[in-house]
Image: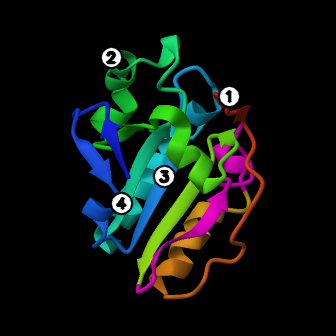
């Protein structure tokens, strides 16, 4: 399964990044205000785990909607400036496959001998509004567990944000 990166207009796939210890996908749209509250946290986590061979990408599940065109997505300075792919999930195939329902919601996918699996799905942390008030850092903890070759605990948390508008 491939998605197009709106920033580079290049194809992106799990297979092309198979050598990564983990692939982190953060569901992100231009219209929802919640993901923007996490920009500095996403940037910090990407930098923290760069040397651990963990890749980060944003995924737009609304790329077929008028206000989320490839041209508009390509202009997202946050993704461009931090060299984070901004993937178009056309027809919401990846979104449905991962079970994501909110924006922002995170999925960590790891590769193993039997294929790919979702190691974690849920919130980045427990406070979208105020970074300094977050007391539980779900994504960070899950990535630390993966680095130690442990199964993340918890594997699923409840994400808070905008609902994904699924197309029939």
Question: Does residue 5 appear in this view?
Answer: yes
* Contact, mark 1 vs mark 4 (Cβ under 8 Å): no
- Residue 92: x %, y % from top left: 54, 38
Bin the neighbour count of mark 4 within 10 Å (Cα to Cα): few under 14, some 14-19, many 20 and up: some
- Residue 101: x %, y % from top left: 70, 43
Residue at image mark 2:
71
Outermost residue to the front? 168
Gap in angstroms between the C-alphas marked 1 and 4: 24 Å
Mark sitting on residue 109: none
- Asked if residue 79 lies left or right of residue 150, the reply is left
Residue at image mark 3:
25
| Magenta stretch in the rendered image | 113-134
133 to 157, vertically: above or below: above
- Residue 3: x %, y % from top left: 36, 43
- Residue 166: x %, y % from top left: 66, 31
Of the residues under marks 4 and 2, which one precedes in the sequence? 4
Residue at image mark 1:
165
**Which residue appears at 66% of the width and 52% of the height?**
99
Residue at image mark 4:
14
Bin the neighbour count of mark 1 within 10 Å (Cα to Cα): few under 14, some 14-19, many 20 and up: few
Of the residues under marks 1 and 2, which one precedes in the sequence? 2
Q: Quadrant of the C terminus?
A: top right
Bin the neighbour count of mark 3 within 10 Å (Cα to Cα): few under 14, some 14-19, many 20 and up: many
Q: Which of the two marks, 1 or 2, is nearer to us in this view?
A: 1
Gap in angstroms between the C-alphas marked 2 and 3: 21 Å
């Amino acid at each position: 399964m491939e998605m197009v990166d709106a920033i580079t207009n290049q194809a992106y796939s799990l297979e092309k990044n198979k050598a990564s210890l983990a692939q982190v996908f953060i569901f992100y749209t231009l219209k929802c205000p919640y993901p923007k509250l996490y920009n500095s946290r996403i940037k910090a986590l990407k930098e923290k785990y760069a040397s651990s061979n963990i890749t980060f990408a944003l995924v737009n599940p609304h790329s077929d909607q008028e206000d989320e065109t490839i041209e508009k997505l390509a202009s997202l300075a946050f993704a461009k400036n931090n060299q984070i792919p901004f993937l178009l999930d056309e027809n919401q195939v990846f979104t449905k496959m991962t079970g994501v329902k909110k924006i922002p919601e995170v999925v960590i996918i790891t590769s193993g001998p039997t294929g790919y699996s979702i190691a974690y799905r849920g919130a980045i942390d427990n406070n979208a509004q105020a970074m300094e008030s977050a007391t539980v850092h779900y994504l960070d903890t899950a990535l630390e567990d993966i680095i130690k070759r442990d199964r993340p605990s918890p594997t699923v948390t409840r994400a808070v944000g905008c609902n994904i508008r699924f197309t029939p």
